Each structure stands twice: as structure tokens, then as C-alpha cells.
Image: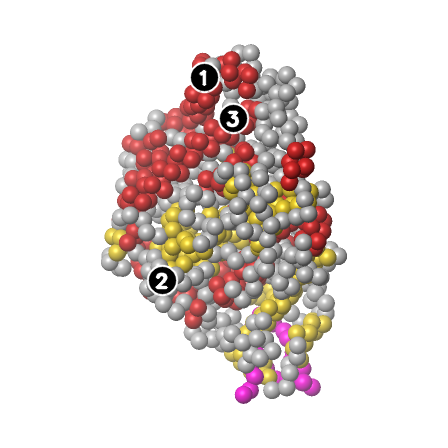
């Protein structure tokens, strides 16, 4: 393995300089809008965003650092930055946290202002996250005991406590009405601000159970009882509603909503609570209690969603509005979709047990994970894990994602997500996170330090080009997953599995059926699998299944047999064997070309451009302007007249046409070669990292040779893009040490 030399930024006009992707100052074409399920400028032009998160001091940096960061991001092809983690009680924050959490910090707002200006003039748009880690003080109107419970990872209280909502609305106004002296515009008036987001990774449906805010939970208990009383009127009516068709009763003898004694079920642990129809109907986790609890939580959060979206309008927000960005279930997704855009997050191999060693990681490689089975512990394929956040008729953006260091093999992952994102025709991908590089033989400084990781950042400009330019063709077929309102109340444990069946083959969106009737225009529709509800008779084709025969959690009416008889016809199939049924049905309907879909341990898109051999561990993309091959590769790779012979066990190879022509016609190509990469001196105990290591970063350079067609020259590129010509021996060029090469055809 070779030491990796960090660098400030690619040399201007070098093969690694992708600044040409940003051809205008941000905001020149007007505000970004949501139209027909896509992000567009006011002039109607489509725009896709590829960018990074800047958090804490990376966003609140000095003026000198702001200039360096903005220029580096420009040359790496970035056109969006999400401003994140800037509202917490830290030395560097947008709030002073003196007597209250309400006073703006003028020093750090000046830093943000200058960064925003530097990004704007380089064509880089802003995504503003308005609430991440805010805490509260006595001057805000909270008791000492309440403040102890309002630590930064409290989630659900943000959606129902009146004081917190009002304080947040004040901060939103102060933030968006703040005048940036460097641009001469308030943030609310600046078209370089593309998206404003009310709250980060937050929902009323789930919490961190280790930090349950008892005072606030008690207030929610009281509201739940009042809600039940308003819905049913009397305990007797509630008792009847919570008695199933077997005569089993879910209401305890000592429970009465008039006395405030009806027990709420538990919230989910970083996901919506899952419905379990096999649970004891008479217990506190019965589906009857779950049904009303989810309806209550939905009603409560929906009021806040409506209030915040209306407040954005009152303030005069002209850009795209997002409510939150981690829909860990269909109920929250339905509410988030009331905004202008939906967003989702995912991490491959997120550290488990904290953010500092010792922490545990799984040992699975994305390129060799069985995508037909649901993963656990951050083992779900990154792009597939977020696909349930994409809603029909709405733009979709992945606001946080990354392959976490120290995953053993990461060189495939940036390109996998960029290629699948383009295939799915998504609107944005924002990496988490960017920190300014420290030149020299410095280490990867955190599990999320992507800029210092050659296994990831070596592909960033090409990935930006591929995603932003749509260089992977979007899927030919559109498959939608239907969700009725009742479906959204009953999320099963396998939520997300069936959508992923479609994701790897065709474009996929979630379709929210507010009136229970599917009226979209997808080529095929999948039932959610939650309940046997929904009218799919208007669909072109439907593939339906349900995990329960009941129409809801009260378990009084079974509809599965009726659903089957009334809706199964020549254009409808029933699920039984998951992706195998999907493959069979799509084939019978003529929607999957021969050789596409799930074939012999691989999955091939309906465009035939992406071939993912998850059994053998090879990810292969053949697109007009580039070729990409990653994983456990054959020793001899041929792309037309180009041939690469190597001895590495695992590698990623990318041949990319810089001039926009096809690979065969291009006169100017960039070749990127990468294997594993890791800090020096890492120490493990099984799957637990004890010591993160130090610099230099060592990378597994590709050993071998390349044979070029006649008339081509090969140039080795330094990490900053400086080129030096390579000499051929017997028509072959030796590959060693370098990550990037430029291939030029003499004209």
C-alpha cells in the first residue's frame, strides 16, 4: 500500500478540475422551485444538486477558510452545501446561549454570511437546516427539570410542545430575515438559498428510548386521552371500538380517557413503531391501541406541519420548503410529503456505540451484500435504503449519506449511489460530511471525513458529473408503491423490502393514496404489504400482498379474500416470494427486457446500463460517456480498445470521458484506479475499532498495466491534477502508485 498525499484543491484547468459544471453564479436563474416532481429554476430549467454537508466549525469558519472551502468544492463539482449543526450550545454557534437561546451570535453569523457569499459567487446553492441541536435555558421559559430533559437528541417533543414550536418560529424568522452584508440580501430574498428545512431527523413517532423526556411524555399522555375522549365520547364507546371480532378487549379495566388513565404504547426507537398483528390483543401493545395511537400522533404532527408550512409562506419564503429529512416509516413520509420536497438519510456502516473508539462496525462490503434480504445495523445498500423517501409527484433529495470510514472496501460506494441516483432520476445527493483538507500525509480524521478519504473523494468530480448531468439513463419503467392512509398507520417490520425489489430494476416512487384509490400513471404498482386496503383497479398493472387479512388494527373486518377476488385479474398478481414474484410479474407484463431484472445472483436495470452481481461482488456500469467496474474484479478488463490487466484482489476502475463524447469517440479521458484505503496503525478487536490510526493514509494502488489503442498517450496525475507523461514498453503502460491517469488521443 502507498501513502496518500492530501492536497488543498485540484489545479485549475487540470483533469481533476470540475469547476466547469458550475457555469453561473447561484441565483442567476431565479429561485429553485418544485414543479412536476422535479427541482427547476424559475425559468423552468431542470437542476440536480450534488453536494456536501458543512457542520459546526466547517460552516462557521474563518473568512480565509471560507474562500478555500468554496474554491475546493467548486473544483470538485459541488453545487449545493447544506448548512448543518450550527444552532447547538457550542462555543461556535449562531446563538449566544447567554441568558436565553434566542440571541443571535453576530460573530458567527458574519462567518456564515461570508461563506454563503463565497459559495454563491461560485455557483453553489444553500440548503438551510433550521433546527438540529438547539437546547434551551431558563430564560426561554423552561424549568430546570425540563431543561435537563431537553438535551440535543430529544426528538418527538419538537412537534407538540407549544413553547418549543414558538421559539423555533422566532429563530426561523431571525435567521431568514438576517441581512447578509456580503450579498446585500436577506437569506429569505436570496435565490442562492434553494431549500429551507424546518427540522433535522425528527418525528413525533420515534425517539431515543434512553433519554425519554418524562415531563413532556406525561403531557403527551394527557393529550392522547383527550384525543380519545373527543373521538369516542365515552369510555364505553372506546371499549366497543377496542374489542375485536373474537371478543378480546384491548382496554384495561382501570383505563378511562375521562380520567386520563389510558396508557399510550411506546414510541419507536429511531423508527416508527411497527404494527404486530400477532401481539396480545389485550396488552398495551395491541394493534387496536397502536391504531389509535398512530392516528393521534399523526394528527398532532400534521397540525405542526401545516403550521410551519403556512409560517414559511407568511414570512415570504420563495424557495423550496422541506419539513424534515428522516421518514423512518410511512406515517411520517406522508406528512413530510406535504412540503415541496421529500428528503431521506442513510449511512453505510455507521459506527455503533458512539462516535469515538471503541466502537463497533460490521464487516460487510456493499458490493457483496445480498440485496434480496433486509439488512441490519446499517447494512442496507445506501441508495436502496433511502428509496422509500421518494414520493410520486415530489422532488427527492438525499440530505445525508456516506460510506463510513473504516469500512474495508469503499471505492465502489460513491459511484454506486451516484449511478443509482441518476437511474432513479432523483434531484439531489449531499454527502456527509466535508471538512477542509490539511495538506500532507495527514489521517482520515473522523468516520465521516470524506474529503481526506481517497477511496471516496477520488471519484467525487466524476460522480458529480454523472449525477448532475444524468449520464446514467433514467429507468424505462416507473413502479410505484401504494400507501393508503390506513397503510401509513400500520408499518410492518419489513417496511422497505418490497420497494427495494423494484428499486434495482426500474424507477421507483411511493404513491400516497389519500382517498384510498390509486389514480397514478405508473407502469406497475405494488401494494404496500401493510393492509388489504386500497383500490388498484385503475392501475395498468398491480402486484399486491398483505401481511394481515384485517383492514385495520381493530381486527373486526377481514378483507383479504374480497381484495383478491375483486382486484386479481390479468393485470394483477399477488406477492408470495418477494423479488421472484416481482421478476415474474414484470416479465409477463413485458416490462422487463430479456436479460434484465434478477438474473442468476445479479440484478440488471431495465436500461441494461447497471449490472450488479451482488453474489460475486462486482458492480458494473456501461454508459455512453463512462465505464465503471468495482469489487472482486477479473484480472483482465477490456473496454473497447482499452485493456487493463491488474493483480489486485479488489479494486474500482473508472474510465470517464472528460469531453462529453462517448468513451470510444473521446479524445480526453480520465482513468481512476483505487483499492482499499486506511489510516496507518489501526487497531481492532474483532469488529470493534480500538484505535482509529494516524497519518499517512495508505491506499491500495492498482498494480498492473494498461494497453491503449493506437494514437493514445497516457499521463500520470498527481493528487492535485498535475500531469506527467508515461512511457510505454512494448505498447504497454505500467500502472503503479498513481490513482488518476489522463488518456489523450492525438488528433
Q: Give x and y (percent) for residue 304.
A: 39, 35
Q: Residues within 10 Å of mark 1 (few under 14, many from 20)?
A: some
The disc label shown at residue 233, or none: 1
First-in-chain label (2 vs 3): 2
Whether 511 is drawn above or below 233: the answer is below
Q: CA distance from mark 1 to mark 3?
A: 14 Å
Question: SS class of the residue under badge 1?
Answer: loop
Q: In the image, what residue occupies the spot 28% across and 54% down?
A: 189
Q: Where is residue 682? Give x, y as percent.
A: 60, 54
What is the magenta range?
A: 726-747
Identify the residue shown where x is 64% and y is 40%: 567
- In the drawing, does residue 395 fall left or right of residue 731? left
Residue to which mark 3 is pinned: 292
Residue positioned 34% across, 28% down in the render? 142
Magenta-drawn stretch contains 228: no
Disc sitting over residue 43 in the figure: 2
User: Looking at the image, is mark 1 or mark 3 earlier in the sequence?
Assistant: 1
Amino acid at each position: 500500500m502507498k501513502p496518500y498525499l492530501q492536497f488543498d484543491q485540484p489545479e485549475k484547468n487540470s483533469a481533476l478540475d470540475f469547476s466547469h459544471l458550475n457555469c453561473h453564479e447561484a441565483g442567476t436563474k431565479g429561485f429553485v422551485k418544485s414543479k412536476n416532481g422535479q427541482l427547476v429554476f424559475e425559468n423552468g430549467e431542470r437542476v440536480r444538486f450534488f453536494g456536501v454537508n458543512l457542520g459546526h466549525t466547517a460552516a462557521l469558519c474563518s473568512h480565509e477558510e471560507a474562500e478555500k472551502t468554496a474554491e475546493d468544492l467548486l473544483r470538485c463539482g459541488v453545487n449545493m452545501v447544506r448548512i448543518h449543526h450550527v444552532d447547538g450550545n457550542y462555543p461556535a454557534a449562531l446563538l449566544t446561549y447567554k441568558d436565553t437561546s434566542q440571541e443571535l451570535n453576530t460573530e458567527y453569523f458574519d462567518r456564515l454570511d461570508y461563506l454563503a457569499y463565497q459559495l454563491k459567487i461560485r455557483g453553489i446553492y444553500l440548503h438551510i437546516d433550521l433546527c438540529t441541536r438547539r437546547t434551551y435555558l431558563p430564560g426561554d421559559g423552561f424549568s430546570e427539570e425540563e431543561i435537563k430533559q431537553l438535551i440535543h437528541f430529544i426528538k418527538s417533543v419538537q412537534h407538540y410542545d407549544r413553547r418549543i414550536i414558538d421559539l423555533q418560529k422566532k429563530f426561523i424568522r431571525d435567521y431568514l430575515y438576517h441581512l447578509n452584508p456580503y450579498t446585500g440580501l436577506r437569506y429569505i430574498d436570496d435565490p442562492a438559498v434553494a431549500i429551507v428545512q424546518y427540522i433535522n431527523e425528527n418525528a413525533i413517532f420515534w425517539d431515543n428510548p434512553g433519554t425519554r423526556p418524562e415531563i413532556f411524555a406525561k403531557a403527551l399522555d394527557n393529550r392522547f386521552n383527550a384525543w380519545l375522549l373527543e373521538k369516542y365520547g365515552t369510555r364505553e364507546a372506546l371499549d366497543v371500538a377496542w374489542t375485536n371480532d373474537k371478543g378480546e378487549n384491548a382496554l384495561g379495566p382501570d383505563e378511562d380517557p375521562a380520567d386520563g388513565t389510558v396508557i399510550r404504547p411506546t414510541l419507536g426507537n429511531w423508527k416508527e413503531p411497527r404494527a404486530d398483528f400477532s401481539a396480545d390483543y389485550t396488552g398495551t401493545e395491541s394493534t387496536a391501541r397502536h391504531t389509535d395511537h398512530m392516528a393521534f400522533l399523526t394528527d398532532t404532527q400534521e397540525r405542526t406541519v401545516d403550521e410551519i408550512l403556512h409560517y414559511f409562506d407568511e414570512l415570504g419564503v420563495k424557495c423550496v420548503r422541506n419539513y424534515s429529512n428522516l421518514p423512518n416509516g410511512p406515517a411520517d413520509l406522508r406528512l413530510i410529503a406535504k412540503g415541496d420536497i421529500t428528503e431521506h438519510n442513510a449511512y453505510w456502516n455507521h459506527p455503533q456505540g458512539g462516535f469515538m473508539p471503541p466502537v463497533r462496525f460490521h464487516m460487510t462490503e456493499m458490493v457483496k451484500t445480498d440485496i434480496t434480504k433486509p439488512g441490519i445495523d446499517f447494512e442496507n445498500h445506501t441508495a436502496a435504503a433511502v428509496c422509500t423517501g421518494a414520493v410520486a409527484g415530489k422532488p427527492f433529495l438525499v440530505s445525508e449519506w456516506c460510506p463510513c470510514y473504516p469500512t474495508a472496501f469503499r471505492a465502489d460506494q460513491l459511484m454506486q449511489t451516484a449511478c443509482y441516483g441518476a437511474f432513479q432520476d432523483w434531484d439531489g445527493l449531499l454527502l456527509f460530511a466535508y471538512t477542509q483538507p490539511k495538506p500532507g500525509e495527514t489521517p482520515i480524521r473522523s468516520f465521516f471525513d470524506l474529503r481526506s478519504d481517497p477511496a471516496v473523494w477520488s471519484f467525487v468530480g466524476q460522480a458529480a458529473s454523472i449525477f448532475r448531468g444524468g449520464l446514467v439513463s433514467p429507468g424505462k419503467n416507473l413502479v410505484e408503491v401504494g400507501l393508503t392512509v390506513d397503510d401509513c398507520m400500520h408499518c410492518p417490520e419489513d417496511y422497505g423490502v418490497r420497494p427495494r425489489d423494484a428499486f434495482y430494476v426500474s424507477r421507483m416512487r411511493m404513491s400516497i393514496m389519500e382517498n384510498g384509490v390509486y389514480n397514478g400513471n405508473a407502469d406497475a404498482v405494488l401494494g404496500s404489504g401493510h393492509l388489504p386496503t386500497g383500490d388498484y383497479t385503475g392501475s395498468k398493472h398491480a402486484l399486491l400482498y398483505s401481511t394481515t387479512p384485517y383492514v385495520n388494527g381493530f381486527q373486526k373486518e377481514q378483507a383479504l379474500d374480497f381484495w383478491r377476488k375483486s382486484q386479481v385479474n390479468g393485470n394483477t398478481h399477488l406477492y408470495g416470494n418477494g423479488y421472484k414474484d416481482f421478476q415474474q410479474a414484470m416479465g409477463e407484463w413485458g416490462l422487463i427486457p430479456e436479460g434484465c431484472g434478477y438474473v442468476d445472483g445479479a440484478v440488471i436495470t431495465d436500461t441494461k446500463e447497471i449490472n450488479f452481481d451482488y453474489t460475486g461482488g462486482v458492480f458494473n456500469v456501461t454508459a455512453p460517456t463512462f465505464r465503471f467496474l468495482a469489487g472482486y474484479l477479473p484480472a483482465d478488463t477490456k473496454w473497447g480498445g482499452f485493456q487493463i490487466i491488474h493483480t489486485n484482489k479488489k479494486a474500482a476502475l473508472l474510465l470517464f470521458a472528460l469531453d462529453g463524447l462517448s468513451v470510444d469517440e473521446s479524445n480526453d479521458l480520465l482513468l481512476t484506479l483505487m483499492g482499499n484505503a486506511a489510516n496507518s496503525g489501526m487497531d481492532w478487536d474483532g469488529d470493534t475499532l480500538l484505535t482509529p490510526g494516524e497519518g499517512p493514509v495508505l491506499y491500495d494502488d492498482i498494480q498492473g498495466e494498461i494497453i491503449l489503442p493506437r494514437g493514445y498517450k497516457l499521463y500520470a496525475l498527481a493528487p492535485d491534477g498535475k500531469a506527467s507523461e508515461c512511457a510505454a514498453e512494448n505498447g504497454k503502460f505500467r500502472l503503479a502508485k498513481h490513482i488518476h491517469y489522463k488518456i489523450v488521443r492525438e488528433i
